[in-house]
Image: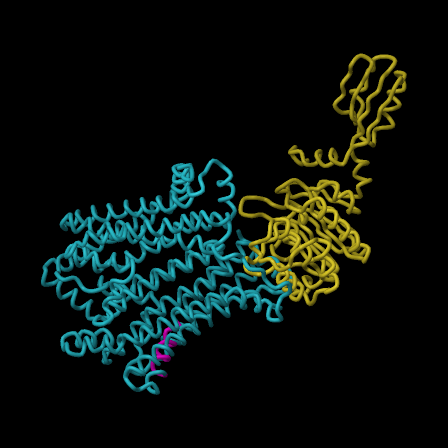
Chain colours: A cyan, B yellow
Amino acid sequence: MTSLTGTGTLVRLILRRDRVLMPIWMLCMALLPMGLASGTASLYPTDAGRQGYIDSLAASPMLLLFYGQKPAEPSLGALIFWRSATGIVIMGLIGLLVVIRHTRVEEEAGRRELLGSAVVGRHAALTAAVLTVSGASLVVGVLVALGMISQQTPASGAFAMGFAWAFAGILYAGVGALAAQLTTGAGTARGIAGAVLGLDFLLRGVGDVAGGGLSWLAWATPLSWVYKVHAYTDDRWWLFAICAAVTVVLAYAALRLSARRDLGAGLLPPRLGPATAPASLSSAFGLAWRLHRGSLLGWTVGLGVVGGVLFGGVAKTASSLLEGNGQLTEIMERIGGKSVASDIFVGGSLGIGAIAVAAYGISAALRMRTEEAALRSEPVLTAGVSRLRWAAGHLTFALLGPTVVMAATGLFAGLVYGASTGEIGRQVPRVVGAALVQMPAVWLLTGLTVAAYGLLPRLSPAVGWVALSLCVLLGQVGAALQLDQLVLDVSPFTHIPHLPGPAAVPATPLLVLTALAAALTAAGLAALRNRDIPVT
Amino acid sequence: MDNAISVVGLTKSFGQAKALDGLDLTVARGEVHGFLGPNGAGKTTTIRILLGLLRADGGTATLLGGDPWRDAVALHRRLAYVPGDVTLWPNLSGGEVIDLLGRLRGGLNAAKRKDLLERFDLDPRKKGRAYSKGNRQKVGLIAALASDVELLLLDEPTSGLDPLMEEVFRQVVAEETRNGRTVLLSSHILSEVEALCDRVSIIRQGRTVETGTLAELRHLTRTHITAELATPPNGLAQLPGVHDLKTDGATVRFQVDQAELDAVLRQLTTHGVRGLVSQPPTLEELFLRHYETEPVR
């Protein structure tokens, strides 16, 4: 097969380039379930204790959205497989990102060309990327299995779990490989593959939460097959055969597409643009609009419309699941205050939506860093545009963009939820309010990113994403790990009042968060005015 | 005299690395000033300080009568800048970038834009990611040259251009200067410098090592002499200004500093000159001598 000549060398090149990054994510992923198992085993040593824990978690439809259907038995292994399902999604995300990093990113940067001129087969680069990611995922899987065995769980279940994690990485490596063939820009390829993963996640979650007529959704996507392995209870090994077959189909399709197109080209031919700029493209703000409008539209449709409709649509079903269960209602009241179950579900969904929107806000703010590092801020900043005006264009989208998305999410959730209960007029303002009340926490994270961009430009992406990860971690597992309230208070989302609900909204935390966000943004802008540009 | 650019004793460090170490630069209004130096000498750093993008650690810089840092925005409306590696937004067409940058500066000369697009043979409809290196450079050049500004700061603007386009660039810059435009041109292409520049400054390791007209600079360099003498020479090596002396019987080859030429020729004639070949220094030698990595005195 001459079309694969050089694949081995390219695998080594990928390993060399990722020699720091790859071991880090592999180790993190491998240690996550083992750590969780060891902590859970000491907190809940008995089956009865674990059953209570599972029931309390499963009472929240939000957690079902993340974890899938609760396990049939309360063994430690089954609990951990269920409880660490977020890791499956992360494996998928890593798989697609790493494949795109070594295919389309390389091609866009022109480095593929250099390689392609050497003795390297047509299919070698794509094959090497998919093989490397699959290999790394399998190693993670084996490490996960060994870690779980070390926690005294049965070996067969441990390996079923390990392979489930591995195949999440492998499947979405295939998705990433296919997406990388479609467009000329790596960013768009990441967007497509990420959207596929996100949609899979949502569909699977809706299937698990809604059940009944929608439960087939929980079987409909590649991600759901990995969930449905149900390690330690069902150990459905045959699902891996399907996963492997689908991966082969995806990779084959990607190779066929790759063979049919020119180097650097996408499936769609690049279109010509206008010869002159429209009137809207006359200012720094006009440029920012051009650069941000695509992602604003994507987020508004993806999260605002699709997410909002899903959240609102499932809310009534979710609440009917709970209403017959007095004990669960009591638990829910303890978590979310005296609210009806559907309110808690809507509020919780919007809380998750706010985390996603914060990711959008951070990435929009980091666009300034991307522009600076690519030397594209220079032509604007030397054409009569002040630094503040330039930053203001991007910040408009980093601060108001997430607000628009969140408002849309609330609007569509409220409309659908209201329609299902026959009280649109009452629910729309309540749910929109519950969505917008999240904004101060979102702005705080954006503000932190802006501050980092001004003061520590090279570190700003790390600051933004680590802060967001910390919030996710504290929100998701903080309460379960019984962390001290002081630690939980670090996340701005902890201070957001639970809405919609009967309680009055305390204004103080919202005002403090907003003021902090403003102060951080101002600090970042002040630093930007006084520092060198570009810092590369 | 009213100078467009006046830089005295400029210093700038990046961490441990000293980029500028007391750089001086004076560009008179209306002249094309060549800005030369080996890679890493500090040319781009100087230009970025003049653009108010970087802040100098020490020294003074004046641009069009203003402070490049404090008055950045006002000054930028009066100048245009072309970097050595023009990067474009991948999804904006070349025409859109030209218009955007022109409008930001307060308007574009539509007739010039059209004329330059034709002369540089650029398709303005292609998206940024579809342009080759040379075509990206053309987008930057047209955006800068199509606006009626007082000062052009060009940082190796022709890198990646083919010889034909290089020629177009020279013609356009020559036309611009006839209209009273001032140009600071950083370049490695000696023929370009020779064709366009009134004066040049050569910098090395963050310092100005030479500045003047090309004729003045030539004057500072060495002439190659090959002489056939009646008797073998003596005492020639001891004369000041004589370098690389090679004696082959009665034939000598050496280089001599322009300033010492008269004294050296006097000494030669005492030996009876039978033949004499004198070669003026080439521009290449002029620059190579300054580019060599000997330590700055």
Going by the image, does B99 lie left or right of A54? right
Q: Give the extent of the magenta segment.
A: A429-440
Going by the image, does A26 lie left or right of A527? left
Q: Position of residue A23 (x, y in %)?
A: 33, 45
Q: In this rendering, does residue A462 appear at all?
A: yes
Write the residue at 36% across / 83% down. Answer: A429
Going by the image, does A512 lie left or right of A457? left
Work out whether residue B125 or residue A14 is closer to the camera in this orientation and state it.
B125
Quadrant of the rendered structure where residue B73 is? bottom right
Going by the image, does B65 lie left or right of A94? right
Q: In this rendering, does residue A384 appear at all?
A: no
Work out whether residue B161 or residue B29 is closer to the camera in this orientation and state it.
B161
Predominant secondary structure in magenta?
A: helix
Asked if the magenta segment contains residue A434, the reply would be: yes
Q: Where is residue A243 in the image (x, y as percent from the top left)?
A: 27, 53
Q: Where is residue A258 in the image (x, y as percent from the top left)?
A: 44, 49
Write the residue at 35% across / 56% down. Answer: A93
Vertical placement of residue A228 versus A12, above or below: below
The number of callouts visible is: 0
Asked if the magenta segment contains residue B293, the reply would be: no
Vertical placement of residue B27 versus A399, above or below: above
Q: Is the N terminus of chain A in the top left, top right, bottom left or bottom right quadrant?
A: top left
Work out whether residue A219 or residue A289 is closer to the camera in this orientation and state it.
A219
Q: Where is residue B278 in the image (x, y as percent from the top left)?
A: 84, 26
Write the residue at 35% across / 81% down. Answer: A415
